[in-house]
Amino acid sequence: MTYLSSRGETGKRLHVLLEARGKIEDAQLELEFRRICANQCDWYYKAMDFQKMKFEPVFVPKASNSTGLQIADLLARPLALQYLRPTQSNKTYEILKSKELNRKVFP
C-alpha cells in the first residue's frame, strides 16, 4: 500500500490477477478478496486501509499461461515454507532472500 501510494496510485483502479480454479472456488475467493478490500477483517497488528485503492479481481484461466502467475507459483511455496517452518532448510528461499524481494505476511 505504501509503495503504491508513494507512486501516485491512490484512488486508481488496480487489477489483481487471480488464477481461475472453478465457479465455486472463484466465487469464494472473490468474496474474501472483496471483504479484505472493504476493510472487513482484523489483522490484529496493523490496520491497513485497502479502500485507498480500487482493487479489482480479474480471474485468468490457467491455460492463459501468464508469466506473472507462473512466477507467483514458483515463489509462493518457498516463501510460505519459510514462514511456516522457519527452522527447515530452504535453499530456494535463501536465493530469493539475496534478491531483496519485498513480501507481506498476512495472518
Image: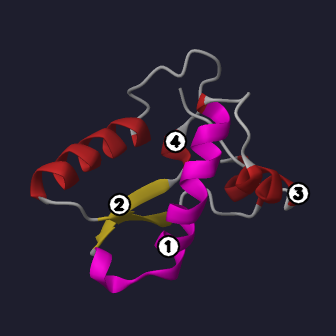
- Seen from the viewer's position, the closer of residues 41 and 106 is 106
Identified at 41% across, 37% down, the residue is 36
Q: Is residue 103 left or right of residue 27?
A: right
- Decide which of tag 1 and tag 3 comes sooner along the chain: 1
Q: CA distance from mark 4 to mark 3?
A: 29 Å
Q: Which mark is residue 98?
A: 3
- Decide which of tag 4 and tag 1 comes sooner along the chain: 4
| Pointer 4 residue | 50
- Decide which of tag 1 and tag 2 comes sooner along the chain: 2
| Pointer 1 residue | 70
In the image, which is nearer the foreground, mark 3 or mark 2?
A: 3
| Pointer 2 residue | 57
- Decide which of tag 4 and tag 3 comes sooner along the chain: 4
Q: Which residues are magenta?
A: 62-83
Question: Is 9 covered by the magenta stretch?
Answer: no
Q: Amino acid at mark 4?
A: Phe
Say which element carries label 2.
strand
Say which element carries label 1.
helix
Q: CA distance from mark 2 to mark 4?
A: 13 Å
- Residues at circles 3 and 2 in contact by the CB criterion of under 8 Å: no
In the image, which is nearer the foreground, mark 2 or mark 4?
A: 2
The quarter of the picture where residue 41 lies is: top left
Q: Amino acid at mark 1?
A: Gln
